[in-house]
Image (cartoon, rainbow, N blue to C red):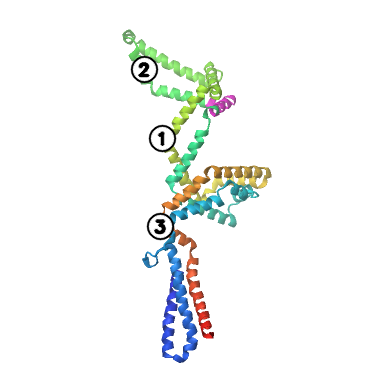
Amino acid sequence: MRLFATGLLLFMAAAFIVLKRLAVLHPEWSGPLGYAISFTEAAMVGGLADWFAVTALFRHPLGLPIPHTAIIPDNKDRIADSMAMFLRDNFLTPQVVARRLKGFNLAAATGAFLSDPARDEQSRIRAGAANLLADVLESLDPEQMGGMVKTGLRRQLEKIDAAPLLGQMLTSAIADRRHLPVLESVLRKIGEAIESNEPLIREMIHQRANSIMRWTGLDERLANGVLDGAYRLLAEVIVQPDHPLRARIDEALAKLAEDLRSKPETQAKVERIKNELIENPAVAAWLDGMWERTRAALLKAVRNPDKALSGALGESLAQLGQALGDDARLQYMVNRFARRTLVGIVSRYGGEIVRLVSETVKRWDARTVTDRIEGAVGRDLQFIRINGTLVGGLFGVCIHVADQLL
């Protein structure tokens, strides 16, 4: 389209030269040729003016630093802020989100998509949404996005009152006897640890025994007795559900659960441990790795949605979609949860999302911004030049007619 618009302008210039030459060679044709000459003359002016206008938006015409040209590159940061403000005011306010979601049955639409994702309409929607999501994930700055995710997770972890939650979980586990497999596993691990460190235990007993015990060999018998007794005790606790040590352990766990729920000293210790874990660099590295793995998995899934929705996962999602499509009460619950969740996300993170968009655009170099905006507008820019050439020619003819009449 750029070549066509430029070619049309050059054609008008060539036609102007040819027509002027014909008017000199054939004066008797000056009347009819006058209209054509006026058309080509005004078309050149209109085409050049619109070429200058379109070019001035994105760069300096002919590389000359003419004032008020290269408007978009020079105002890149202001455009980024305007885009972010537009996004915030029209999409990322709780009122707008709630209004847009009101009356929209998200659960039914999701159910229809999950129950029959192979339909042509659903396939097009899935492909378009997948490409859009992949482009968004790839265009956003990974470090800043990862930092935003980590900040959000950290804030949520800091808000959690861990001690009462752990106490309630432990109380429920003891009441339902769900702690027994964990207890038995811990006892087995203790037995394996003792077995793998038998030489070290024997050496410790040997070093602490007096010389008489070592001379008489009683230290070895003592080590055998200690190890055998430990193995026997662990085995009895594992196989006997009513073993007294189990009752002691249950009592200790129940007391710990009660302290976690109601004892300020224990709660303060758990809160201190939680904060130390959050501040630990290893946890930050784990969150970094978790975000990168999640991002890579999301990109892989959205780039190949058909494969992601196949197999057992696809069957499970189809069953979920069928339930969403048939159960009105489930739809109501899902839609209400989705509305509250999205409104809550926008309320908490809308400002950060807007700032992320603004800062991402600001980090682009001027050429990147220019190329992306020019590519987004596309052919219409060249139609401006084409229309300017043709409309300018028509006005030239009108001016020539008015000149002849006057």
Q: Please name the residue shown 50% across and 66% down the image.
A: 380
Q: Please name the residue shown 54% across and 47% down the image.
A: 311
Q: Earlier in the sequence, mark 2 or mark 1?
A: 2
Q: At which x and y percent is residue 169?
A: 56, 28
- Which stretch appears magenta? 165-181
- Report the residue marked by disc 1: 282
Give yes or no for residue 169 being in the magenta stretch.
Answer: yes
Q: Earlier in the sequence, mark 3 or mark 2?
A: 2
Question: Can residue 4 be seen from the camera position used here?
Answer: no
- Report the residue marked by disc 2: 202
Residue 330's image quarter?
top right
Q: Nearer the viewer, mark 3 or mark 2?
A: 3
Task: Point out which mark residue 366 bears.
Answer: 3
Q: At which x and y percent is residue 72?
A: 44, 59
Mark 2 neighbour class, 10 Å CA radius: few under 14, some 14 to 19, many 20 or more = some
Residue 219's image quarter?
top left
Q: Residue furthest top?
A: 212
Question: Can residue 186 be seen from the camera position used here?
Answer: yes
Q: Residue furthest right?
A: 328
Mark 1 neighbour class, 10 Å CA radius: few under 14, some 14 to 19, many 20 or more = few
Residues marked 2 and 1 touching at CB (< 8 Å)? no
